[in-house]
Image (cartoon, rainbow, N blue to C red):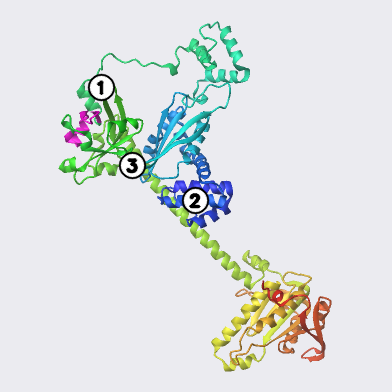
Amino acid sequence: YGFINTCLKSLVVEKYGEETWEKLRLQAGVQDSFLTFEVYKDEITMQLVDKACKILGVPADMVLRDFGKYFFEFCKRSGYDHMLRTLGGNLYEFIENLDALHSYLSLSYQASSSSNYQAEKNEDGSMHLHYYSDRRGLCHIVPGIIGAAALDFFNIEISMEIVNQTEEEERTGKKEHIVFLVTQNPVFSYKERNIFSSSSQYLTDSEKKIENQLNKEGLEKAKNTVRDRGNSVCPVKKSHWKTVRGIITLGKGKLLRGFDPVYPKSLWIDTKTFCNGLPFHMVFDKELKVKQAGVSIQKIVPGLQTVGVCLDHYFSIVHPEVPFTISSIQKFINSQFVFQTRREMMPQSWKQRPMLELRGQMIWMESLQCMLYLCSPLLRTLHELEERQMHIADIAPHDVTRDLILLNQQRLAEMELSNQLERKKEELRILSKHLEEEKKKTEALLYAMLPQHVANQLKEGKRVEAGEFKECTILFSDVVTFTNICAQCEPIQIVLMLNSMYLRFDRLTTVHDVYKVETIGDAYMVVGGVPVPVPTHAERVANFALGMIIAAKGVQNPVSGNPIQIRVGIHTGPVLAGVVGEKMPRYCLFGDTVNIASRMESHGVPSKIHLSSSAYQCLKYKNFEITERGEIEVKGKGKMHTYFLVRNKTATENEIMGRP
């Protein structure tokens, strides 16, 4: 389920950061988020684990162990804390009831394929944990989960090592069977605990007070307390906890921990009442021959009314996946067993219905050498009840299955609603992501038309005030004989030629960090020092102009087939800059500096960069080679002394063009 993959993502993000997760998921080729109740292929999880090992440089067993620890915490944070905490009073009971928890969760997570756990006590206080799974290679998660649970719930540290590893597909239906040796690590030298004893959180208030006293004042003071009370029945050899229990016994009588049940001499219930009161039960011997059965199961499977029939003729074992033999059942006796009726042995009326499943507990009766199967119909919803043409009344009033069906019906409806909300949330997240991408595209387009700070002011609805710049450098360029070219070519050829040229020029504006003001026909206008004032505005525009001359050689004249020629004019001076218009607003420059720069271009020479005297003054000590043109007559300005920019003495052509 998506819950597992979400947990794995949360671990990576929390421990290694969002960037690591993004890199990991891209390499694994998986989506960014997972729906909790959606079923995903195992390959996705395996891919994520495999890529995590490679990216983080950590062995697989360590990654899985860390995941196991984190998964335990993730389950607690996701609302399963109380459910896990109440499974057992000690680690042994906790593990023994994990299968029951999985069985309950399968009501909601119907497509889940959970692993099985079986615990065996050893005389030395250790334990063997048998782990059965359909998935190979994930066994290292188990020490992480069990170790975290032991420390959190029972305040003990444990070590787990693999002592046996086999494949049992033929025998149990599980691909992997791992046996772990579980031993407790010594935490406190004066505490006498093992993995089968209840932790301090389950002790009575009196015991807790005395435990705290022992921790603070030591064992000797406890012995003195006993002597002061005049209790001579606690030998010195006893551990302090036995001493403590002796003290409490004086005031309260026997502890619950030492409870001995009382059984009647004979069973005060007749056979008929037993079979009616437990309508779904069966008793069978070592040969699987049925000795008795409840009335409801007899009604559904009439063949059971014949005493001595073989149980495996009428049922198959669905869970745990073991052979239908008494020895296999005894081995997994602490697991919940699920039986399913065999279609060929059912009455004709059941042939079109789904088969009935029973779930319950196995109890071995040593004196009778028989097995008692106390069970109930395994029904998750009212729909499943209707499919089998059964009714709530068919289930015993004391059987919680009645409540479970009704509660789970409500739970499934809530899950479906939660799933829909999760899907909508995911759709909104994707839409938000796409919206953000489109917003970036729009902003990029806007920033290409207007300076960024101006565009941001307009977006915020503010008025953009015109700004005065005391010194900047303006460049104009145009294509030589552009009018003649237009007269002899198709319009599309002109468009392609200008587009090829402007793409090259636009790239150079980024290289030299100058601002492109506008293009009108074949004219291209650039400014340095506006909208952000910089002291190197003249050098930037000069290097840009040198790049333009080189770039123009790569653009073909559609008439002659030769490279086009351009004229470039540059002037330095003050300007006023501001936004004009509301529809298609433009950032425009005003002032005589613009006019003079335009005149420098129109009075220029093909493939030359024409400089005014003010531009020359800014560049003459900046490692540029400049030649004097002399005085020329400029339209509207009279005589002006001008210059030609030849080259940059210190920069190579590749540097001018921004090539590597």
Q: Is residue 587 in view? A: no
Q: Which residue is mark 3?
A: 173
Q: Amino acid at mark 2?
A: Asp
- Distance between the Cα atoms at labels 1 and 2? 53 Å
Neighbour class for label 3 at 10 Å: few (<14), some, many (≥20)? some
Answer with left or right where residue 317 lies relative to residue 61: left
Residue 447 occupies quadrant:
bottom right
- Along the viewing direction, whichever of 54 and 201 lies nearer the viewer: 54
Q: What residue lies at 40% left-to-right and 50% top-to-bottom?
A: 39
Q: Which residue is mark 2?
A: 50
- Along the viewing direction, whichever of 99 and 482 lies nearer the viewer: 99
Q: Earlier in the sequence, mark 1 or mark 2?
A: 2
Q: Which residue is mark 1?
A: 368
In magenta, the rendered stretch is 281-303
Q: Earlier in the sequence, mark 3 or mark 2?
A: 2
Q: Amino acid at mark 3?
A: Gly
